[in-house]
Image: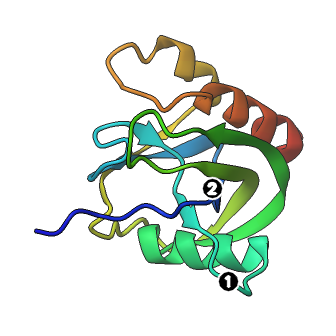
Amino acid sequence: MAAIVQPTRPQIAVSAAIFRDGKVLLTRRAHSPAKGFYSLPGGRVEFGESLHQALAREIDEETGLDIEIIGLAGWREVLPAAAGAGHYLIMSFAARWVAREPVLNDELDDYRWIAPKALASLGDLKLTGGLEEVIQSAHRLMGP
């Protein structure tokens, strides 16, 4: 299997904190980077796509869900930790579940709907860096 060649410039990615019945969707990455960590579904923005177009496409590809995008909840920069690792700027959005049940593609191997207040007590789950802060920000955008 050939090694994956990382781009030599930062890549823009999007993710969504998707809320349904007071809970947020966490998905577990099946491959590197972040294999085994729970995070928000999403992925790279393709050339010519708006952030919202990329987010809707990535959520559909990874989970099969229909969503309504509410607004930008925050961003995170992931710097290369080792030679050959990627550099990403991840724009994270708050979104509302609209339709369909999760059907994961091969990039993900598990999902859970979790109450935002329960995140701090999930000691057994490995979460990606900054996840709790993005979810809390997204939760505030969703309103009461």
Q: Quadrant of residue 73?
A: top right
Q: Secondary structure at mark 2?
A: strand
**Res. 18 visible in picture:** no
Badge 2 is on which residue?
A: 15
Q: Position of residue 139 (x, y in %)?
A: 77, 37
- Please tell me which residue is depicted at 63% across the width and 60% down the height of the picture: 13
Tell which residue pokes out farthest to the left in this image. 1
Marks 1 and 2, the one that precedes in the sequence: 2
Q: Position of residue 51 (x, y in %)?
A: 76, 71
Q: Nearer the viewer, residue 9 or 32?
A: 9
Q: Amino acid at mark 1?
A: Phe
- Label at residue 126: none
Q: Amino acid at mark 2?
A: Ser
Q: Position of residue 119 (x, y in %)?
A: 54, 22
* Figure label count: 2
Vertical relation: 47 (above or below) 15: below
Seen in the image, is 56 located left or right of residue 126?
right
Seen in the image, is 73 located left or right of residue 66?
right
- Please tell me which residue is depicted at 71% across the width and 50% down the height of the picture: 92
Disc 1/disc 2 C-alpha distance (Å): 17 Å
- Label at residue 47: 1
Q: Quadrant of the C terminus?
A: top right
- Please tell me which residue is depicted at 32% across the width and 70% down the height of the picture: 105
